[in-house]
Amino acid sequence: MVQAQGMKFLKEGVLPHMWCPGCGIGVVLGALLRSFEELGYERKNTVVVTGIGCTGKADDYLTTNALHTTHGRALAFATGIKAFNPKLNVVVLMGDGDSVTIGGNHFIHAARRNIDLTAIIINNFNYGMTGGQVSGTTPCGAVTQTSVYGNPERGFDICALAEVSGANYVARATPYHVWDLKRNVKEALMKKGFSVVEVYSPCPTHFGKNNDMKETRDMLRWLKEKGLPVEEYRRLRPSERQDFFAVGKLVDRDEPDFNTRYEKNREIAMARKG
Ligand SMILES: Cc1ncc(C[n+]2csc(CCOP(=O)(O)OP(=O)(O)O)c2C)c(N)n1
Ligand code: SF4
């Protein structure tokens, strides 16, 4: 029997998975595993690093090397792995809590270093696993378990943060635009330097329920109607942009990554010594 694409990276007997019906996490994992296969990745030279939370459970399902770390610290562990063995393909899967709330400092510094990692961030706009509390990406006015009158704070724009911090590749995708999502994940994996794919992902159980999107289809419709291809989004006037978000590749540059700079500096220093 022919095995479906990506299945060799999924452990046997682990389905059905633990995520709620309608959750976007499984869709993102599917896109990642298909990308691994298309790029010819092997289990032994691939490491998937996760943090804690619903997204952080993803490593339970994998046949690649997998490391389940602490909340907010996945990028720090991944940096250590890549620095020790630059030949490994290192992918970091994080929630919005892991990546830019408790883990915000690690995120900006991983991007600033331009370390050769791929960060896939599943942004469901709240802390899914612990009951739907407010996070650093919860939009202003959105209701969560800890912002019952509407969030008084502004939410981070993860892609903008990645861009100004120095990431070489930045894209935003959604499970509604699933084939574009896979293309962005593949591009990010192929890019040298720090690459980020932010996925706006449905959490119908908490975020949807608290924000008038009780059914999964309501959340998917929201992603479909508000997500505009990046070229279309950029043609909007700034005042019109607030009702939409850009989907697609936002940043693509080839600044030297950490290891390349390190090696170059080392050679120069050694030559100077004679
Ligand atoms: C240091 C630390 N603080 C708090 C927690 C409790 N905790 C576990 S998961 C989580 C939130 C996870 O949210 P996110 O990273 O957005 O992932 P999601 O569950 O939404 O996928 C928190 C606060 C923890 N495990 N460790
Ligand atoms: S709580 Fe939300 S993020 Fe967690 S599995 Fe359920 S739908 Fe997904």
Image (cartoon, rainbow, N blue to C red):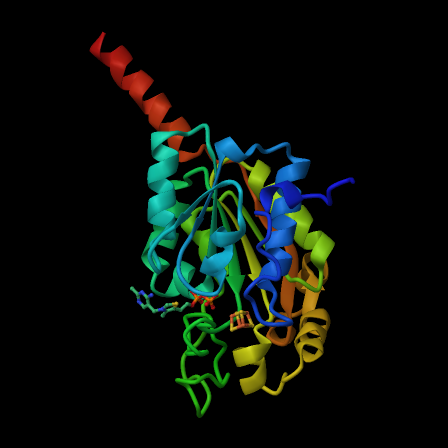
The image quadrant where one finds the N terminus is top right
Q: Is residue 146 visible?
A: yes
> Where does residue 179 sit, x and y in percent of width and height?
73, 53
In the foreground, 202 or 162: 202
Q: Residue at x 47, y 46 (%)?
A: 167
Q: Residue furthest bottom?
A: 149
Q: Residue at x 34, y 45 (%)?
A: 77
Considering only vertical position in the picture, is 264 above or below 181? above
Q: Residue furthest front?
A: 13
Ligand 1 lies in quarter = bottom left
> Where does residue 225 sit, x and y in percent of width and height?
72, 73
Considering only vertical position in the picture, is 113 above or below 266? below
Considering only vertical position in the picture, is 110 above or below 175? above
Q: Is residue 249 visible?
A: no
Q: How many marks?
A: 0
In the foreground, 239 or 99: 99
Q: Viewed as shown, does residue 61 lie left or right of 219?
A: left
Q: To which quarter of the image does residue 210 belong?
A: bottom right
Q: Residue furthest top?
A: 274
In the foreground, 260 or 177: 177
Q: Residue at x 57, y 47 (%)?
A: 11
> Where does residue 73 sit, x and y in percent of width and height?
33, 54
Considering only vertical position in the picture, is 159 above or below 75? below
The image quadrant where one finds the C terminus is top left
Q: Residue at x 63, y 76 (%)?
A: 243
